[in-house]
Structures are given as C-alpha cells and as structure tokens.
C-alpha cells in the first residue's frame, strides 16, 4: 500500500542524485572547481602515492554516475513506489550519493583529513546496500543491470578508492611508514585490497560487477607503477597478481553456484 513515506523515499533518492551529479561536475573541474587529482595539493594525483591508480581509471565514474541517475529516475516510477526491494534500498543509495558529494566537497576545500571518514562511511553504506541486494531478487533484467550492476561497480571501485584515499591522507600528513619502504607498504595495501576482492566474490557468490570495478582500479594502479613518474615494480606485480586471483575466484564461484543450486534442489526433491 502506497504511503507518503514511499514518496519521501523516492524524492530523497532523486534529490540526492541531482546533488551528486552537481558534485561530480565540480569535482571534474567542468564547473570551475579544481579537478580532483589537482585538489588538496595534488595528494590524490596518479603519482602521489604507490597506491594511486592512473588517471584513466577514473573514467569508471561515467557508467557509475549514469547508472545512479537512471536508477533515481527509474525508482521514481509508480511501479517502484511500493516495491519492497526499493523500500529497503532507497535510503542506502541516497546516503551513498550524499556521501559522494560530501567527499568531493571535502577534497575541494583541501580537507583531506575529513575525506577519510567520509569515504570509509561511504564504503560502509555501499556494503549495506550490497547485502540488501544479495538478500533480495530483481524483478526484471532492467533492474538487474540498473540496480545490481550499478551498485556492484560502485562498491568495487570505492574499495580501491578507499585504500588510495587513506594512503594519500597518511602521506600528506607526513606518515613515514614506521620505517618500512614505500614498496613494502604498496605491496601490503594492494594485497589487502586483493583479499577484499576475494571476500566480495565469496559473499556475493561470484557477482561480476564488484570484481570488474575492483580489478579495473587495481589494474590502473599496476599501470601507473610501471609507466608513471612514481615507479614500483613490486607494487605493480602485486596488483597484477591480485587482479588474476580475484578474477579466478569470482569466475570459479560463478560457475560453481548453479551446480550447487541444482544439487540442493535434487536433494530436496
């Protein structure tokens, strides 16, 4: 039964998407703002830390933003107003959009230290949304692509962005790595990111989009460390290995999942 709460949820998502879109224009420098890679003294540039991905990696925001805007419009349709899945997903998605805009503003105003808790909270909200997606089922192929696909890309990329953001903030604050070399820290952090990718594959039972986005980010980290101004062969090799491992685990789980379901169905029958 439709209620005023449903309209409030739909409106909140749509307004949040508009604010996030405005923030993305500011963050790109198209609206007079400083491009993200140049903001905060260049702390997030491709050669600022061993974990920073190459510039082209940020092109992934195009399909993510497109999917989020289309979702905001789609979920406003009358048919989605009382959909139980959208009732659960609406506010987490809206929160992620607002946190995304807040992150851009914190970087634009050179508040790099503030961007860390913001992006960590963004990651937590995306995990929340991902768990809801796993616990519910889409009603159409369009919903699968628009909701599951977009949020999967969003989560996978923010996993890499969170690692890069925290590293950039530590470096900007003068963190010396407890005496460990930059290469050692690069290998360690990329290895952790790879483990996160494996965890996402296991929890998501072989979902492709989180893996593709995470591997996209790690692939560009490897590219930047092999060809950019800040070279680190150990970090690049670790990133490549992480990409291969996460892809293999994801594909294995995806292939195995239908067999497991069939076996369970047979046993039940």
Image (tube, rainbow, N blue to C red):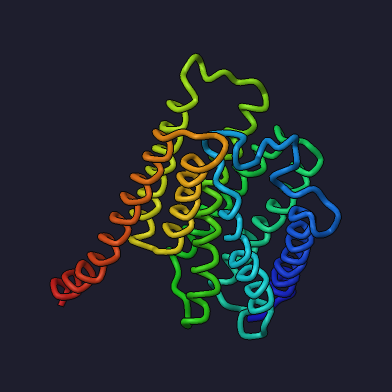
> Which of 174 and 226 lies nearest the eye of the viewer?
226
Residue drawn at x 58%, y 55% is 56
- Expressed as whole percent of the image width and height from the top left, the position of residue 181 reads 47, 21
Residue drawn at x 32%, y 58% is 250
> Which of 133 and 52 lies nearest the eye of the viewer?
52
Compared across the picture, whether 140 is left or right of 241 comes to right
Residue extending farthest top? 179
Residue drawn at x 51%, y 52% is 127
- Expressed as whole percent of the image width and height from the top left, the position of residue 23 reads 77, 57
Classify 115 as above or below 100. Answer: above
Q: Quadrant of the C terminus?
A: bottom left
Labels in figure, total: 0
Residue extending farthest bottom? 79
**Res 81 quadrant in image:** bottom right
- Expressed as whole percent of the image width and height from the top left, the position of residue 67 reads 60, 70
Q: Quadrant of the N terminus?
A: bottom right
Residue drawn at x 49%, y 44% is 221
- Expressed as whole percent of the image width and height from the top left, the position of residue 107 reads 74, 42
Compared across the picture, whether 235 is left or right of 94 comes to left
Compared across the picture, whether 25 is left or right of 47 comes to right
Classify 161 as above or below 170. Answer: below
> Which of 40 and 128 lies nearest the eye of the viewer?
40
């Amino acid at each position: 039964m439709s209620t005023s709460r449903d309209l409030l949820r739909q409106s909140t998502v749509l307004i949040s998407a508009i604010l996030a879109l405005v923030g993305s224009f500011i963050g790109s420098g198209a609206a007079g703002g400083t491009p993200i890679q140049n903001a905060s003294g260049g702390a997030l540039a491709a050669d600022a830390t061993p974990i920073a991905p190459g510039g082209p990696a940020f092109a992934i925001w195009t399909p993510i933003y497109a999917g989020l805007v289309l979702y905001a419009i789609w979920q406003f349709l009358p048919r989605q107003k009382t959909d139980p899945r959208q009732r659960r997903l609406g506010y987490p998605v809206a929160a992620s959009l607002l946190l995304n805009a807040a992150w851009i503003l914190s970087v634009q105003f050179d508040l790099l230290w503030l961007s860390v808790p913001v992006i960590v909270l963004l990651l937590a909200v995306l995990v929340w949304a991902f768990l809801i997606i796993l616990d519910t089922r889409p009603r159409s192929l369009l919903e699968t692509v628009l909701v599951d696909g977009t949020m999967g890309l969003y989560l996978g990329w923010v996993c890499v962005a969170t690692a890069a953001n925290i590293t950039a903030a530590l470096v900007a604050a003068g963190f010396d790595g407890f005496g460990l070399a930059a290469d050692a820290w690069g290998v360690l952090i990329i290895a952790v990111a790879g483990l996160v990718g494996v965890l996402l594959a296991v929890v998501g039972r072989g979902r492709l989009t989180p893996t593709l986005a995470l591997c996209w980010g790690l692939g560009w980290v490897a590219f930047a460390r092999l060809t950019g101004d800040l070279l680190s062969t150990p970090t690049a090799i670790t990133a490549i290995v992480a990409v291969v491992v996460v892809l293999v685990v994801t594909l294995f789980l995806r292939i195995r999942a239908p067999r497991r379901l069939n076996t369970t169905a047979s046993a039940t029958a």
